[in-house]
Image (cartoon, helix red, strand yellow):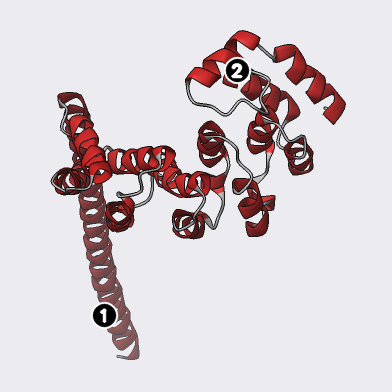
Protein backbone atom coordinates (compact mmCIF):
# COMPACT_ATOMS: atom_id res chain seq x y z
CA UNK A 1 0.00 0.00 0.00
CA UNK A 2 1.08 3.55 -0.71
CA UNK A 3 1.22 6.16 2.07
CA UNK A 4 -1.64 8.07 0.43
CA UNK A 5 -3.88 4.97 0.59
CA UNK A 6 -2.96 4.32 4.22
CA UNK A 7 -3.77 7.90 5.24
CA UNK A 8 -7.15 7.61 3.51
CA UNK A 9 -7.83 4.27 5.27
CA UNK A 10 -7.00 5.84 8.65
CA UNK A 11 -9.36 8.73 8.00
CA UNK A 12 -12.18 6.33 7.02
CA UNK A 13 -11.60 4.32 10.22
CA UNK A 14 -11.65 7.41 12.48
CA UNK A 15 -14.39 7.30 15.10
CA UNK A 16 -15.24 10.52 17.03
CA UNK A 17 -17.04 8.48 19.70
CA UNK A 18 -13.93 6.40 20.34
CA UNK A 19 -11.88 9.59 20.48
CA UNK A 20 -13.97 10.69 23.45
CA UNK A 21 -13.45 7.31 25.11
CA UNK A 22 -9.70 7.70 24.66
CA UNK A 23 -9.81 11.00 26.52
CA UNK A 24 -11.59 9.34 29.44
CA UNK A 25 -8.77 6.76 29.60
CA UNK A 26 -6.18 9.50 29.93
CA UNK A 27 -4.86 9.16 26.37
CA UNK A 28 -3.34 12.29 24.89
CA UNK A 29 -5.68 12.93 21.94
CA UNK A 30 -4.18 16.19 20.68
CA UNK A 31 -2.73 14.35 17.67
CA UNK A 32 -5.28 11.51 17.54
CA UNK A 33 -8.19 10.89 15.17
CA UNK A 34 -9.82 7.96 17.06
CA UNK A 35 -8.99 4.70 15.29
CA UNK A 36 -9.59 1.56 17.33
CA UNK A 37 -6.73 -0.90 17.81
CA UNK A 38 -8.37 -3.84 15.93
CA UNK A 39 -8.67 -1.63 12.85
CA UNK A 40 -5.05 -0.54 13.16
CA UNK A 41 -3.98 -4.20 13.39
CA UNK A 42 -6.04 -5.09 10.30
CA UNK A 43 -4.52 -2.20 8.39
CA UNK A 44 -1.03 -3.27 9.50
CA UNK A 45 -1.75 -6.78 8.23
CA UNK A 46 -2.72 -5.39 4.82
CA UNK A 47 0.44 -3.27 4.71
CA UNK A 48 2.77 -6.08 5.80
CA UNK A 49 6.16 -5.67 7.43
CA UNK A 50 7.81 -2.69 5.78
CA UNK A 51 10.41 -0.66 7.68
CA UNK A 52 10.58 2.09 5.11
CA UNK A 53 6.82 2.55 5.32
CA UNK A 54 7.08 2.50 9.12
CA UNK A 55 9.42 5.50 8.93
CA UNK A 56 6.96 7.33 6.68
CA UNK A 57 4.07 6.57 9.02
CA UNK A 58 6.11 7.83 11.96
CA UNK A 59 6.68 11.07 10.10
CA UNK A 60 2.92 11.68 9.88
CA UNK A 61 3.22 13.04 13.42
CA UNK A 62 -0.03 11.71 14.81
CA UNK A 63 -1.12 9.16 17.39
CA UNK A 64 -2.39 6.43 15.07
CA UNK A 65 0.55 6.87 12.69
CA UNK A 66 3.03 6.16 15.49
CA UNK A 67 1.21 3.02 16.66
CA UNK A 68 0.81 1.78 13.09
CA UNK A 69 4.51 2.42 12.49
CA UNK A 70 5.28 0.13 15.43
CA UNK A 71 3.09 -2.59 13.98
CA UNK A 72 4.72 -2.64 10.53
CA UNK A 73 8.33 -1.88 11.51
CA UNK A 74 10.91 -4.65 11.06
CA UNK A 75 12.83 -5.27 14.32
CA UNK A 76 15.95 -6.56 12.56
CA UNK A 77 16.20 -3.28 10.64
CA UNK A 78 15.78 -0.92 13.59
CA UNK A 79 19.04 0.58 14.83
CA UNK A 80 19.46 1.57 18.47
CA UNK A 81 19.56 5.27 17.60
CA UNK A 82 16.21 5.03 15.82
CA UNK A 83 14.62 3.20 18.77
CA UNK A 84 15.77 6.00 21.10
CA UNK A 85 14.42 8.66 18.73
CA UNK A 86 11.03 6.96 18.54
CA UNK A 87 10.59 6.43 22.28
CA UNK A 88 11.56 10.02 23.04
CA UNK A 89 8.79 11.26 20.75
CA UNK A 90 5.94 9.18 22.16
CA UNK A 91 3.08 11.39 23.32
CA UNK A 92 0.84 9.07 25.33
CA UNK A 93 0.95 6.07 27.68
CA UNK A 94 -0.88 3.83 25.20
CA UNK A 95 1.66 4.61 22.46
CA UNK A 96 4.36 3.50 24.91
CA UNK A 97 2.57 0.25 25.74
CA UNK A 98 1.76 -0.67 22.13
CA UNK A 99 5.24 -0.04 20.78
CA UNK A 100 6.87 -1.90 23.65
CA UNK A 101 4.60 -4.90 23.12
CA UNK A 102 4.68 -5.06 19.34
CA UNK A 103 8.15 -3.75 18.50
CA UNK A 104 10.70 -2.81 21.17
CA UNK A 105 10.59 -6.14 23.04
CA UNK A 106 11.58 -7.88 19.78
CA UNK A 107 14.77 -5.85 19.35
CA UNK A 108 18.01 -7.81 19.93
CA UNK A 109 19.28 -5.11 22.32
CA UNK A 110 16.09 -4.96 24.40
CA UNK A 111 17.99 -5.53 27.67
CA UNK A 112 20.09 -2.42 26.97
CA UNK A 113 16.90 -0.44 26.36
CA UNK A 114 15.43 -1.53 29.70
CA UNK A 115 18.51 -0.44 31.63
CA UNK A 116 18.90 2.89 29.83
CA UNK A 117 15.25 3.90 29.55
CA UNK A 118 14.46 3.18 33.20
CA UNK A 119 17.02 5.81 34.19
CA UNK A 120 15.64 8.38 31.73
CA UNK A 121 14.17 11.61 33.12
CA UNK A 122 11.20 11.68 30.72
CA UNK A 123 8.13 9.95 32.21
CA UNK A 124 7.10 8.14 29.01
CA UNK A 125 10.62 6.90 28.28
CA UNK A 126 10.95 5.67 31.85
CA UNK A 127 7.55 4.00 31.57
CA UNK A 128 8.78 2.28 28.41
CA UNK A 129 11.68 0.76 30.36
CA UNK A 130 9.32 -0.82 32.89
CA UNK A 131 6.77 -1.85 30.27
CA UNK A 132 9.59 -3.67 28.49
CA UNK A 133 10.11 -5.71 31.65
CA UNK A 134 6.42 -6.59 31.43
CA UNK A 135 6.65 -7.42 27.71
CA UNK A 136 9.72 -9.64 28.08
CA UNK A 137 8.04 -11.38 31.02
CA UNK A 138 5.09 -12.22 28.77
CA UNK A 139 6.78 -12.95 25.45
CA UNK A 140 10.29 -14.23 26.26
CA UNK A 141 9.20 -17.70 27.35
CA UNK A 142 12.66 -19.29 27.34
CA UNK A 143 14.21 -16.89 29.84
CA UNK A 144 14.98 -18.34 33.27
CA UNK A 145 13.54 -16.96 36.53
CA UNK A 146 16.92 -15.57 37.56
CA UNK A 147 16.80 -13.19 34.62
CA UNK A 148 13.77 -11.42 36.09
CA UNK A 149 14.96 -11.46 39.69
CA UNK A 150 17.48 -8.77 38.78
CA UNK A 151 14.62 -6.34 38.13
CA UNK A 152 13.18 -6.53 41.64
CA UNK A 153 15.96 -4.30 43.00
CA UNK A 154 15.32 -1.87 40.15
CA UNK A 155 11.61 -1.82 40.96
CA UNK A 156 12.33 -1.08 44.62
CA UNK A 157 14.74 1.68 43.66
CA UNK A 158 12.21 3.46 41.44
CA UNK A 159 9.10 2.80 43.53
CA UNK A 160 9.20 6.34 44.90
CA UNK A 161 8.58 8.00 41.50
CA UNK A 162 5.21 9.72 42.03
CA UNK A 163 4.46 10.38 38.37
CA UNK A 164 1.25 8.50 37.57
CA UNK A 165 2.35 6.77 34.35
CA UNK A 166 5.65 5.77 35.91
CA UNK A 167 4.35 4.40 39.22
CA UNK A 168 1.69 2.38 37.38
CA UNK A 169 4.34 0.90 35.10
CA UNK A 170 6.54 0.05 38.11
CA UNK A 171 3.54 -1.63 39.73
CA UNK A 172 2.74 -3.49 36.49
CA UNK A 173 6.31 -4.77 36.21
CA UNK A 174 6.21 -6.08 39.79
CA UNK A 175 2.87 -7.80 39.23
CA UNK A 176 3.92 -9.33 35.91
CA UNK A 177 7.13 -10.77 37.36
CA UNK A 178 5.10 -12.26 40.19
CA UNK A 179 2.66 -13.82 37.74
CA UNK A 180 5.31 -15.55 35.63
CA UNK A 181 6.09 -18.54 37.91
CA UNK A 182 5.23 -19.66 41.43
CA UNK A 183 8.89 -19.16 42.41
CA UNK A 184 8.99 -15.57 41.16
CA UNK A 185 5.64 -15.00 42.83
CA UNK A 186 7.22 -15.58 46.24
CA UNK A 187 10.00 -13.07 45.57
CA UNK A 188 7.59 -10.51 44.13
CA UNK A 189 5.25 -10.89 47.11
CA UNK A 190 8.14 -10.37 49.51
CA UNK A 191 9.07 -7.14 47.74
CA UNK A 192 5.45 -6.01 47.61
CA UNK A 193 5.16 -6.53 51.37
CA UNK A 194 8.37 -4.57 51.88
CA UNK A 195 7.07 -1.68 49.74
CA UNK A 196 3.70 -1.75 51.53
CA UNK A 197 5.52 -1.26 54.81
CA UNK A 198 7.38 1.85 53.66
CA UNK A 199 6.35 5.35 54.73
CA UNK A 200 6.61 6.66 51.17
CA UNK A 201 3.04 6.89 49.80
CA UNK A 202 3.93 5.83 46.25
CA UNK A 203 5.93 2.78 47.38
CA UNK A 204 3.12 1.90 49.76
CA UNK A 205 0.52 2.05 46.97
CA UNK A 206 2.64 -0.04 44.58
CA UNK A 207 3.16 -2.75 47.19
CA UNK A 208 -0.43 -2.78 48.43
CA UNK A 209 -1.89 -2.88 44.92
CA UNK A 210 0.49 -5.64 43.77
CA UNK A 211 -0.29 -7.85 46.76
CA UNK A 212 -4.01 -7.89 45.93
CA UNK A 213 -3.33 -9.63 42.64
CA UNK A 214 -0.24 -11.65 43.49
CA UNK A 215 -1.88 -13.26 46.53
CA UNK A 216 -5.24 -13.84 44.87
CA UNK A 217 -6.59 -17.40 44.59
CA UNK A 218 -6.90 -17.04 40.81
CA UNK A 219 -3.22 -16.19 40.30
CA UNK A 220 -1.89 -18.75 42.78
CA UNK A 221 -4.07 -21.52 41.33
CA UNK A 222 -2.87 -20.75 37.80
CA UNK A 223 0.78 -20.63 38.85
CA UNK A 224 0.54 -23.88 40.83
CA UNK A 225 -1.04 -25.63 37.85
CA UNK A 226 1.67 -24.21 35.61
CA UNK A 227 4.36 -25.47 37.99
CA UNK A 228 2.72 -28.88 38.19
CA UNK A 229 2.66 -29.06 34.41
CA UNK A 230 6.33 -28.00 34.26
CA UNK A 231 7.37 -30.66 36.75
CA UNK A 232 5.43 -33.33 34.87
CA UNK A 233 7.16 -32.29 31.67
CA UNK A 234 10.57 -32.52 33.38
CA UNK A 235 9.71 -35.97 34.79
CA UNK A 236 8.49 -37.15 31.40
CA UNK A 237 11.71 -35.94 29.83
CA UNK A 238 13.74 -37.64 32.58
CA UNK A 239 11.90 -40.92 32.06
CA UNK A 240 12.41 -40.65 28.31
CA UNK A 241 16.14 -40.06 28.76
CA UNK A 242 16.31 -42.94 31.24
CA UNK A 243 14.56 -45.28 28.79
CA UNK A 244 16.88 -44.11 26.04
CA UNK A 245 19.97 -44.84 28.17
CA UNK A 246 18.63 -48.26 29.11
CA UNK A 247 17.91 -49.04 25.46
CA UNK A 248 21.43 -47.92 24.52
CA UNK A 249 22.85 -50.04 27.35
CA UNK A 250 20.93 -53.10 26.15
CA UNK A 251 22.00 -52.44 22.59
CA UNK A 252 25.65 -52.15 23.68
CA UNK A 253 25.35 -55.36 25.74
CA UNK A 254 23.80 -57.21 22.80
CA UNK A 255 26.52 -55.94 20.49
CA UNK A 256 29.21 -56.99 22.98
CA UNK A 257 27.62 -60.47 23.24
CA UNK A 258 27.53 -60.75 19.46
CA UNK A 259 31.15 -59.65 19.21
CA UNK A 260 32.12 -62.20 21.86
CA UNK A 261 30.26 -64.96 20.05
CA UNK A 262 31.81 -63.88 16.78
CA UNK A 263 35.23 -63.98 18.40
CA UNK A 264 34.62 -67.50 19.69
CA UNK A 265 33.44 -68.68 16.27
CA UNK A 266 36.50 -67.18 14.60
CA UNK A 267 38.73 -68.88 17.20
CA UNK A 268 37.08 -72.26 16.60
CA UNK A 269 37.36 -71.79 12.86
CA UNK A 270 41.04 -70.95 13.20
CA UNK A 271 41.60 -74.02 15.38
CA UNK A 272 39.88 -76.29 12.86
CA UNK A 273 41.93 -74.79 10.09
CA UNK A 274 45.11 -75.44 12.08
CA UNK A 275 44.13 -79.07 12.73
CA UNK A 276 43.29 -79.63 9.06
CA UNK A 277 46.63 -78.19 7.98
CA UNK A 278 48.45 -80.42 10.52
CA UNK A 279 46.65 -83.55 9.31
CA UNK A 280 47.64 -82.89 5.72
CA UNK A 281 51.33 -82.61 6.65
CA UNK A 282 51.21 -86.06 8.25
Question: What residue sits 24% from the left and 66% below the top?
Answer: 256
Place of residue 94 in the rendered image (x, y in percent of width and height, measured from the top left): 52, 31
In the orientation shown, which residue stands out farthest toward the top? 17
Q: In this orientation, which residue lies closer to the viewer: 65 or 266? A: 65
Name the one closer to the observer, 128 or 19.
19
Tag nearer the camera, 2 or 1: 2
Taking 252 as reference, is 123 left or right? right
Residue 14 in view here = yes
Looking at the picture, does residue 40 appear above or below residue 20? below
Q: Is residue 222 above or below residue 12?
A: below
Earlier sequence position, callout 2 versus callout 1: 2
The kind of secondary structure element at disc 2 is loop
Q: Position of residue 180 (x, y in %)?
A: 29, 40
Q: What residue would you read off at disc 1?
A: 271
Within 10 Å of disc 2 (Cα), the crowding (few <14, some 14-19, many 20+) is: some
Q: Is residue 173 left or right of residue 268?
A: right
Which residue shows up at 60% across the image and 41% down it? 90
Q: Residue at x 51, y 54 (%)?
A: 110
Q: Quadrant of the C terminus?
A: bottom left
Q: Secondary structure at mark 1?
A: helix
Q: Which residue is labeled 2 in the image?
A: 36
- Determine the residue located farthest toward the bottom in the rendered image: 281
Dividing the image into 4 quarters, which one contains the N terminus?
Answer: top right
Amino acid sequence: MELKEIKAALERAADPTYLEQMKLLGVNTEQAIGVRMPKLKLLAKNIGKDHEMASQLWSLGHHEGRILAGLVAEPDKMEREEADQWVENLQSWDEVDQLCGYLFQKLPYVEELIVDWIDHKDAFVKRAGFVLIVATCIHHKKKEDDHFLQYLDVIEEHATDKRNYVKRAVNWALRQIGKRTIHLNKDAVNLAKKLKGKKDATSNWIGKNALKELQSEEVLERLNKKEEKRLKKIEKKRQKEKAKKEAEKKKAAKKAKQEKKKGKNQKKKAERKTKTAGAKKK
